Image (cartoon, rainbow, N blue to C red):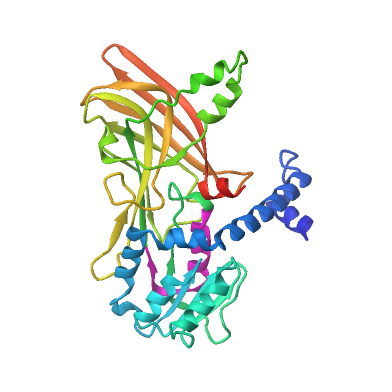
Amino acid sequence: MFEDIAKQKLKVDGEYASADLTLDLALKRIKDHRHQESLYFKLYGRIEVQEWLLKDPARNKAYREAILCNESFKNKTVLDVGCGMGILSLFAAKAGAKRVLAVDASSTTDFAHRIVQDNGYGDVIMVIRGKVEDIELPADMHKVDIIVCDWMGYCLFSENMLDSLIFARDKWLVAGGHIFPDSAQLFLAAIKGRDQDLGFWHDVHGFDLSAIRRRCESKAVVEHVTAGQVMSKVCLVKSLDLYNVRRNSSDFRSSYELKVIRNGWVHALVAYFDVGFSKSPQRISFSTSPSAPWTHWNQTVFYLETPLSVKSGESIKGVFSIRPSVDSIFDLEFDIYVDFQSSGKSVTSQQSFVLTNPLILGAL
């Protein structure tokens, strides 16, 4: 079976691809990715991970307010992609949905089923265990009116759940159907932060461990950034309309210009995202900005090899590129080019970064 899938992936316009991607390598990647998927769904089947998500006040308040008291859900069929414990499905049922399909590939469906029964929605919500790409709708249901999904990952795109939402949208959403949330924007800014003290690795008890430094420099960091650390205006690097976005939208490059707003040092660039629910009566939205209330996504920080001494009014320019890792479904890869010109000095650099879901790191 693996070999048939690999051959299909290698086939290009009726011919097999060149030896750059051999059949053996394609087979290995498929097997590795399936192992990684198994680990991913096992992780998200843990109660403490689901508890972590359910205790995110900004996330849950936005979904609750966007769905409850929303006439759009009255007598509608709803698909909840990646339902977890089923809280979004419960919101939809309480808002008057006629039927809700709650789909998740992790063992949380066992709890979701019990929770649905305990709350009296067993006749409305059907819990299905499986990847949305692998399941089928009940025989008497051909389309759904609404899709709800918490697809956003760290730096918006980690874990690539957006493609699962797009799959469900293209296969099952009726013409004119609604998606919750239905917009997202990724932003970049410059921040002051901590010096990483990576020079430590050059001399550890008389030995050169700079190979560790190089690895540390290449890691994007998920951490909490405060509004007081922000040193520039923000720049929009990606905007998504979930009704029209296509697969592989997490693979892009964008030019940026960050206008400095105060004197001091810039140690890093930071990425954060906003999402919106345009089909809610109050057009609900929430942000993971350093200026917004805390969310479990925090912010994604890219530390510069050389901090920049900046003055208000100056600009940091460059190119920001992002792509899913070929080798790991957990990782995003970034290339960030920085060009800074300031009163007689010029700093240009290009750094590559890898972002891994910190929950995955903790489970490995």
Residue at the (27%, 63%) spot, across then down: 284
Relative height, residue 200 to residue 143 (above, below): above
Nearest the viewer among 75 and 224 is: 224
Residue at (62%, 44%) from the top-left corner? 326
Q: Position of residue 177 (x, y in %)?
A: 39, 73
- Compared to 364, does 183 lie above or below? below
**Residue 90 found in image quarter:** bottom left
Q: Position of residue 8 (x, y in %)?
A: 72, 56
Judged left or right of residue 75, residue 233 is left
Q: Is residue 56 left or right of residue 18?
A: left
- Quadrant where the N terminus is found in the figure: bottom right
- Circle count: 0
Q: Please state if 197 lies on the left or on the right of 189 as rendered.
A: right
Relative to 211, residue 58 above or below: below
Position of 7 relative to 117 (above/below): above
Q: Quadrant of residue 66?
A: bottom left
Q: Residue 312 in the image: x percent, y percent?
A: 21, 26
User: Is residue 172 a member of the stretch shown in magenta?
Assistant: yes
Tell me if residue 153 is in the magenta stretch.
Answer: no
Segment tinted magenta in the rendering: 160-181
- In percent of width and height, residue 167 lies at 53, 64
Residue sitting farthest toward the front: 205
Is residue 25 at all visible to an observer of this figure? yes
Question: Is there any visible trace of residue 330 in the rendered image?
Answer: no
| Residue sitting at x 54%, y 24% | 213
